Image (spheres, rainbow, N blue to C red):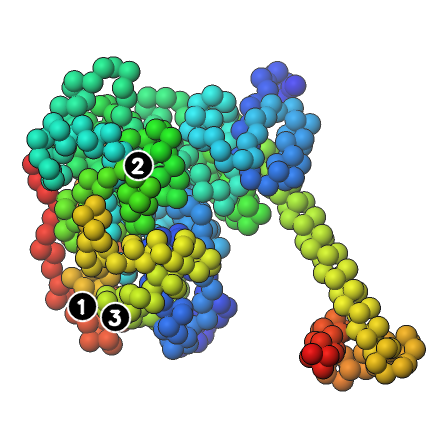
Amino acid sequence: MFSSVYSAVRPRPLKLGFVPLLDSAPLAVALEAGYFESEGLHVELHREASWSSIRDKLVFGLLDGAHMLAPLPLACSLGLGSVHKPVVTSLALGLNGNAVTLGQPLYNELQRLCGLDRPGPAALARALRQFLDNRSSERQITLATVFPYSMHNYLLRHWLSLGNIDPDCDLNLVVVPPDMMVSALNSGEVQGYCVGEPYNGLAVHEGIGRIAFTGHDLWPEAPEKVFGVTAQWASTYPDTHERVVRALLRACQWLDDPANHQDLGKLLSRPDFVGLDAETLQGAVAQMTAPAGSDLPCTHKLFCAQGGTAPLPERMQWIAEQMLRWQQITQPVSGELLGQVYIPEPYNAAAKSLNLPVTGELSVTSGPLTP
Amino acid sequence: MADRHGKVAAPQHVLLVDSEPARAALLEQALKDAGYTVDKQVHGDRSLARLVAESQPDMIIIDIDAPDRDVLEQMTQLSRSNPRPVVMYADEDDTAFVEQAIQSGVSAYVANGMRPDRVKATLSVAVARFREFQNLRQELDHARTELADRKLIEKAKGLIMTHRGVNEDDAYRALRKMAMDRSCRLSDVARNVIDIFDITQE
């Protein structure tokens, strides 16, 4: 057998997948700023069209690692919607960044029912309940998220439950790919959605929707995306894993510095990254730290700050509870399984070398809004 | 149509979603030849959810890079109220086969009740056609490059002939020698020659 020194470094180029969204930025930045290179890694980034594609290519070895929805490693490890293959994460790719956008007519009606100029999430949910009770039967409400195992889905469902709305009976929940959200809203196929930027701001720009509230209004410091690899890969290449995590961690630090935000929009607009026009992306980047006008609230998108990169079990526990609550699973997820999916070691080793707090020194201070 | 057990099976209905029209046509024909009925969508202009509801397929074959795939993931969750497709990759013993499918760009969803052997047979047809298409495209790309290369070489040869007053054979030999000395491709040398003449003419 080779000693671990030789076997630990992945020989061929690493293939890392991402879905073209603002929060895939750590991968693009790590590549462009040379953080992967300074770890001795040769990385190829692969732009993927869907979360299904990310998952399938990862679990069948066509990708080494990927930008993924925070609930996805657990879903894969439970065999939900796919082959049962353990996927792990040791690095979160930041917090917050989602918002709920409602079509202008629905928003106006809810605003009127609330009697408030700027109703918060709970008031809006109660108004929606009232709206559903009063509507004529042919007026079905359909709301969209991006994937069944996503924070978008769980946040939207949680919001509805604040108004005592059963998302599986009282309205339709569907999946629409992020870049088709605005057109689905425009065509009337859906009346609202929960998605990451820039697809909320785009609806506002086109004058067809209103950002009802941000994910941060519902749960400040909510998990969002993670970097996932298969359990098998993590145990075969622990050294490479730590190097990838460190490179991405440095990219997340870079992303939290507003001085870099001017470059970020330009970088992401490249067709091999997010590929939308630079102005739209620059707007979404600006919204990460401040409102960009009265209808474009701050999304509080954080990458490294507030322990946003740490694989903290408390955040993941909520995801496991949502899977049970919304009947995606029938048995509670054991603490043992959670411990297998969210592994702290590569993160802690990388964090220590960058003088960042390790998981044991961090705690979660906020949770989702309760009724 | 009789199956392995001699029973007459109803024709299976396949929904084919692929943005590559030539590939979709290739697979559609193969599936029809194998006795399937086929609905095909090559432009993503109709809602996939509505299409599935209308088409009621036994199996959906969809390009792995289609952005619409996540829509199907949601539908697999709704089976409580409605018989909907379930994800294909259930046959966990055969990961090599699934890997092959993914590599050639095929993903598939099957309705509850479709027999595993039929699923695999159908998927094999799809994988074979997707591969065939991949090869065709590679050959076409190759042919295009070859044609472009030949044009470059012709142009470089012509330039050398006019500017140096040599015949065609000598011009070609000069190009070939340069390529061999620098161990690079003839077409690359030709491109350099053209560039240099372009600059000196300005």
Left or right of B28 in this view: A232: left
Mark drawn on residue A259: 3
**Real-space CA distance between mark 3 and mark 1, rounded to the nearest whole angstrom:** 26 Å
In the depicted structure, whether residue A155 falls above or below residue A241: above
- Residue shown at 29%/31% (left/top)? A191
Determine whether, in the image, residue A320 is placed left or right of residue A86.
Answer: left
Instruction: Calculate the distance from the C-alpha at mark 3 to the C-alpha at mark 2.
Output: 32 Å
At 12% across and 40% down in the image, what residue appears? A118
Tell which tag, 3 or 2, sits nearer the viewer: 2
Q: Mark 2: which secondary structure?
A: loop
The answer to the question of whether label 3 and label 2 lie on touching residues, with beta carbons closer than 8 A, is no
For the N terminus of chain B, give its image quadrant. Answer: top right
State whether residue A254 is above or below residue A158. below
Which chain is disc 3 placed on? A
Query: Residues at badges 3 and 1 in contact (C-beta under 8 Å)?
Result: no
The amino acid beneath tag 3 is Ala
Tell which of A1 and B114 is nearer to you.
B114
Q: Residue at x 8, y 40 (%)?
A: A370
User: Between disc 1 and disc 2, whose residue precedes?
Assistant: 2
Q: Which numbered disc flags the more N-terminal residue, 3 or 2? A: 2
**Closer to the camera, B164 or A140?**
B164
Q: Residues within 10 Å of mark 3 (few under 14, many from 20)?
A: few
Question: Where residue A208 is drawn, which disc sits there?
Answer: 2
Q: Are both tags, 3 and 1, on one chain?
A: yes
Q: Chain of mark 1?
A: A
Q: Residue A51 versus residue B195: which sits nearer the camera?
A: B195
- The residue at the point 17 percent across, 37 percent down is A159
